[in-house]
Amino acid sequence: MTIADQIYQKFSSGKKQLFLLADPDKFDASVLNSESFKNIAEKVDLFLLGGSLLSASSVEKSAAEIKSGTDIPVVLFPGRSIQLVPNVDAVLFLSLISGRNAEYLIGQHVQAAPFLYQNNIETIPTGYMLIDGGKMTSVQYISHSLPIPADKTDIAVATALAGKYIGQKLLYLEAGSGALNTVPAEMISAIAKATELPLIVGGGITTAEQANELYAAGAAAIVIGTAFEDNPSEMEAIIQSIKK
C-alpha cells in the first residue's frame, strides 16, 4: 500500500494522524532511543523530513538514521529540488498555492521530476498554504511569499478549492515552525467542509488542547516539529494526551 493510500485510508475511516517533522540540520538520532520517543512511537504515523536550508547529504543521513531506528515511514518535505534523496518512502510534491512565486508553483517541480522518475519515488501532490502564525517564518522569507492572513477564511477556502481543482490530493496548512499561533480552527473547518480533502495542519502546536482543537475542526493530521525537537519529554506528555 502506498503512503498516499495509507493516509487516505485513515482519513476515510476517521482516524486522526500524527506526523513528526524533523529538520535534518537539527535532528539528533539519539532521540529515537529515548524513552520519551519509545513511549509515543506507536502514535506517530510518519516522519516528515524537511527544512528551508538543507543539503541533500544531511537529508539522506537523517532518513537513513530514522529508517534504521524505527519502522515509521519517512516522507520527504522538500523546500527545493536539491534536497531530494532516494532513501525515503515518499515525497510530498509541494506546490506553494498560497503564493505567487512561480519558482515554487512549477519551477522547482520541473527540476525535481527527472530525479523522482529515475528513482521511482512515490509522489503525493500537495497544495501547500502558508497561513499567518504571528511571525515571519523561514519559508516565507526563502520563498518570497506572503501568508494568507489568519482572519481571511474566504481567501483560504478559495485557495484550497483551487488546489483541489488542479489536482492536489492533500492540503497542508502551515503556520510555520515556532509560530506564535496555530492555523485558526474556523479556517480549518471551512476548508475541510469545502474541499473534503485530507488536511495536514502544522505550526505553533505546543499543547494537547491545541492539537485536539485542530483535530475537532477537521484536521486529518497534525504536524509537531520544533516542540518535539526542543523538549522530547514534555512533548511525550502532550502526545500521550492527544485524542487520536
Image (spheres, rainbow, N blue to C red):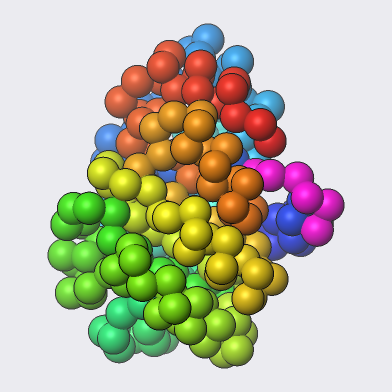
Q: Position of residue 94 (x, y in %)?
A: 45, 71
Q: Position of residue 65 (x, y in %)?
A: 47, 33
Q: Does residue 240 appear anywhere in the picture? A: yes
144 left or right of 23 in image = left
Extent of the magenta region: 12-17
Question: Could you say which is closer to the camera, residue 171 or residue 185?
Answer: 185
Judge whether 145 appears above or below 174 on screen.
below
Query: Based on the displayed image, in which of its 4 quarters is residue 41 positioned?
Result: top right
Residue at image coords 59%, 21%: 240
Q: Position of residue 57 (x, y in %)?
A: 33, 49
Q: Position of residue 23 (x, y in %)?
A: 34, 43
Quadrant, the C terminus: top right
Residue at image coords 63%, 46%: 216
Residue at image coords 16%, 65%: 141
Judge whether 231 appears above or below 101 on screen.
above
Quadrant, the N terminus: bottom right
Query: Based on the displayed image, in which of its 4 quarters is residue 218 positioned?
Result: bottom right
6 left or right of 38 in image = right
Question: Could you say which is closer to the camera, residue 37 or residue 97?
Answer: 97
Residue at image coords 53%, 10%: 35
Q: Is residue 105 located in the magenta-colored stretch of the structure? A: no
